[in-house]
Image (tube, rainbow, N blue to C red):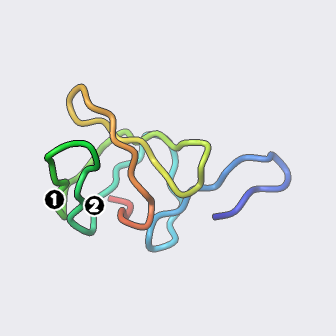
Amino acid sequence: MSIDEDEWTVITKDSNGNILKDGDSVVVIKDLDVKGAKATIKRGTTYKNIRCTSSAEEVEVREGKSVWVLKTCFVKKG
C-alpha cells in the first residue's frame, strides 16, 4: 500500500507487486469463501474490468449482477 505524494492518489498493487488500474483483469490465486452467501470463488477465476476502491488493499469485481470486493493479496494481474 502506498500513496503518491504528488497527486494524493491511492496506488493499488496485486499480490506480486504489479500496479492495478481500473479496467485491468485479475486472476484469483486462492479459493475464497464469500461471507453472507453460500458461494466460493474458485482459484483461477478471471475477472475483467476491475474497479479500484479508495482502499489500496481492495478492488471491486463484477460477476453477473453481483459486485464482489476482493482483497488484493488474493489476486494477481491477468
Instruction: Give coordinates of residue 11: x percent, y percent.
Output: 63, 55
Hey, which residue is sitting farthest front in the picture?
36
Instruction: Give coordinates of residue 32: x percent, y percent.
Output: 24, 60
At horizontal 53% and vertical 57% (from top left) the residue drawn is: 57
At horizontal 25% and vertical 68% (from top left) the residue drawn is: 30
Instruction: Give coordinates of residue 77: x percent, y percent.
Output: 38, 60
Q: Which mark is residue 78?
A: none
Q: Which residue carries the number 1 mark?
A: 42
Circle nearer the N terminus (2, 1): 2
Q: Quadrant of residue 1?
A: bottom right
Q: How many marks?
A: 2
Q: Which mark is residue 28?
A: 2
- The residue closer to the viewer here, 50 or 33, is 33
Hey, which residue is sitting farthest right in the picture?
6
Inspect the image, locate mark 2, and give the three-letter code of the amino acid beneath it. Val
Q: Quadrant of residue 56?
A: bottom right
